[in-house]
Image (cartoon, rainbow, N blue to C red):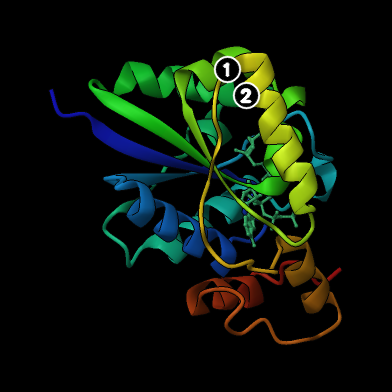
Amino acid sequence: MIKYKMGIMGGTFDPIHIGHLILAEEAKNHFGLDKIIFIPTGKPPHKHWDNVADSVHRYEMTLIATIDNPDFIVSSIEIDREGTTYTIDTIKYLINQYNNTEFYFITGADSIVEIFKWKDTEKLLSLCNFITAKRAIVSDNKLEKTILDIEKRLGTTIDILPIPYIDISSTNIRQRIKRGKSIKYYVQDGVREYILKNKLYID
Ligand SMILES: Nc1ncnc2c1ncn2[C@@H]1O[C@H](COP(=O)(O)OP(=O)(O)OP(=O)(O)O)[C@@H](O)[C@H]1O
Ligand SMILES: O=C(O)c1ccc[n+]([C@@H]2O[C@H](COP(=O)([O-])O)[C@@H](O)[C@H]2O)c1
């Protein structure tokens, strides 16, 4: 039976930038994924939520950034969920919703090197494939060590997506806005307009 291949791009998206979009598009092409679901985070365990833009803004910006790509879908499942949001719950939910579907969770290296701190890591990696891209903020050595550790401890492989480093982060974009610098081309035009209109990240 032919399986449907669904990519999942989970992120805080504060704001969503071209790094996220290139990562999702490249993962889709390289692994032959049918669609990518972008899932803005609710309240995952590892961030200080007082410093993060409201979920409605992050969701809206994600919609704006992906609207021109028919293979990109945006889901509000995590921002609608009460309490702390864990990826394991999201994956279990999606498995129930979609029959005959294989899931691929798309990440950057900074997420993978923290994976043993996630909830139910072993179960999560048994339910879902993980794809990662190298990032300048994580040494290749550290990433390779983590992947070897995952293979040794859990018998699972993490696939590295062969794309160039994209040295852009939401942190860097927020800092640029605070300093009055341009973010043109760092984010989609519609996202930039949304940020300006809603006066996000200026203080
Ligand atoms: N430039 C990039 N290259 C590769 N992966 C990326 C890049 N930017 C983000 N990601 C990955 O996308 C996912 C969601 O990232 P997130 O929304 O936290 O963006 P971020 O730029 O890392 O944000 P912040 O700077 O606020 O931590 C994470 O798995 C992250 O590693
Ligand atoms: O489930 C967990 O324990 C968990 C811990 C840390 C991060 N995550 C997920 O990892 C994805 C990337 O997170 P972030 O903070 O880098 O945007 C996002 O979908 C988070 O929900 C998940």
Q: Secondary structure at mark 2?
A: helix
Residue 142 appears left or right of 190: right
If the image is split into quadrants, where does the N terminus sit?
Answer: top left
Q: Secondary structure at mark 1?
A: loop
Residue 177 in view in this figure: yes
Check disc 1 and report the residue beneath it.
155
Q: Which mark is residue 19?
A: none
- Whether label 2 touches label 1, CB < 8 Å: yes
Q: Quadrant of residue 164?
A: bottom right
Q: Please tell me which residue lies in front, 177 or 165.
A: 165
Residue occupying image coordinates x 58% and y 61%: 16
Residue occupying image coordinates x 67% and y 81%: 183
The picture quadrant for ligand 1 comes to bottom right
Check disc 2 and report the residue beneath it.
151
Q: What amino acid does circle 1 point to?
A: Gly
Residue 120 in view in this figure: no
- Judge: label 1 CB < 8 Å from ligand 2: no
- For label 2, the crowd category at 10 Å Cα-Cα, with few meaning under 14, some 14 to 19 and many 20 or more, is few
146 in relation to 164, above or below: above
Report how far apart the C-alphas of labels 2 and 1 lie in the structure. Answer: 4 Å
Give the percent coordinates (x, y) of residue 162. 51, 57
Q: What amino acid does circle 2 point to?
A: Glu
Residue 5 appears left or right of 45: left
Residue 146 appears left or right of 5: right
Give the percent coordinates (x, y) of residue 197. 61, 75
